[in-house]
Image (tube, rainbow, N blue to C red):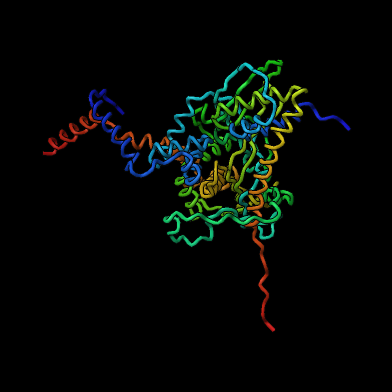
Amino acid sequence: MAYVAVKGGERAIDNAHAWLAEARRGNPAVPDLTLAQIQQQMGRAVDRVMAEGALYDPELAALAIKQAQGDLIEAAFLLRAYRTTLPRFGYAAPVDTAAMALRRRISAVYKDLPGGQLLGPTYDYTHRLLDFLLAAGATPPPAAEAAEPAAAMPRVADILAQEGLIETHTDTGTEPGDLTREPLAFPAGRDIRLQALARGDEGFLLAMGYSTQRGWGGSHPFVGELRVGEVTVEITPPELGFAIDIGDITLTECALVNQFKGSKTVPPQFTSGYGLTFGHAERKAMGMALVDRAMRAEELGEDATAPAQNIEFVLYHSDNIEGTGFVEHLKLPHYVDFQSELEAIRRMREDTK
Amino acid sequence: MTALPPHVARQRWMSVLARATAADLADRLAACPALPDHIRLRGPESGLVMLRGRAGGAGSQFNLGEMTVTRCTVRNADGFVGHAYIQGRDHATAALAAALDAGLQDPARQPDLLRTVIEPLATAQAEQRAAQARRAAATKVEFFTMATMRS
């Protein structure tokens, strides 16, 4: 690509941005939206921006949504830009999702699983009819509470693993790669793939996951478990020398149970795909798990022929900040490129005369 | 019975302080003798911590994404050094939490601070968690078997 230095247009840009600010505010007779309102009442948008911005901070995500007029990819871009201004204090211990304070936990493979099925605050089973009471500003009645709190519950993957029916994951102890420090390179290990998917575009992961269900690299998934709730974040500051809790974050985890496979040395067993994402984001976590499993095709001795199984294809296109940068740069002046194309095509037309 | 290592009590109060708001802390502090003066050795300053997950939930680690964190270190007039690391970007909370961490390490102040600040906050936080768990339990599916009506 060739760019040419373009001068001029400053006043047009300033005026355009001033209009943008006015348009963002909307009719001043309508009350200004507060960050607390966005955080409290647009929670799923906040979660998506945190996940794709790869930065957990609900208040900043709310600000980004307000600034971007609800354009969630633009908002995620704002978070990615903001994080570059902060120093990194360190790494947290891996979150313990088995100890999650659950709001929701369901399994599509076991009806009577230990701990039971907790529906939590779900849109499943709603009729998708517009609720005009919300338009009227109705206050809902308080949610029901059981006499006894739900206990912490074992992960379904751990239950299956006890019987040896599913592949087990062990910690190899290797330091995971970090896309915020090292550019993406291939072959990309599962650590890098999971980091890329966790910050990947929800729509892209949904479509790629959907494609595997439609026959492009199918792996017959069941939702072993989907859980949503709060996990503790723990760090060990060097000046203290012991681990401390620094807060709680909301996560969604999806563990898929996929078609069995065996080999000469391993008896047939289920394999798994894994999704973990910031906030309450079931579609994202499920898409991530489908694509994670698809990208393991080669590792598991399957033919890797479908787009979702192509690691380079998936990882090069999962990031919507990079995607929007490259697609939207086409709007910037390409006057010189186009001039040369114009001249070339005129010459060619002359030659054919 | 073996004694717990000395940092266990400190871990607990630091975890309670990390989950409190500045308003919570100021409210509780109003109910006990004033903390000694302190100087700030570091911060409050905001930064990032990279969060991690495990492949499949139990396997090798991967980097999940970052979180904002604010830290502060103070030394109080009695010579105790207090640290705070808290989620988010609230400098006031981190500064208060560090001053409390310093005060809580002083055996002369600790019982009072535990009773008036830490225990009430711990109780409120536990109740908040329990309330969510009771709501979750209310959405537990009770399956029943359809009886066949053949006679």
> Relative to A280, is A163 on the left or the right?
right
Along the viewing direction, whichever of B26 and B81 lies nearer the viewer? B26
Q: Is residue B130 above or below residue B49?
A: below
Along the viewing direction, whichever of A208 and A200 lies nearer the viewer? A200
Position of residue A189 measured from the top left corner of the image (x, y, whole percent): 57, 35
Image point 65% across, 58% down: which residue?
B140
> Relative to A237, is A49 on the left or the right?
left
Quarter of the image holding residue A278?
Answer: top right
Along the viewing direction, whichever of B79 and A104 lies nearer the viewer? B79
Q: In the picture, which quadrant includes the C terminus of chain B?
A: bottom right
Position of residue A304 measured from the top left corner of the image (x, y, whole percent): 52, 46
Q: In the picture, which quadrant includes the N terminus of chain B?
A: top right
Identity of the residue furthest to the left in this view:
A353
Q: Is residue A115 above or below residue A46?
A: below
Examine the rendering and report whether any part of residue A314 can be seen: no
> Relative to A109, is A188 on the left or the right?
left
Q: Is residue B146 above or below residue A256?
A: below
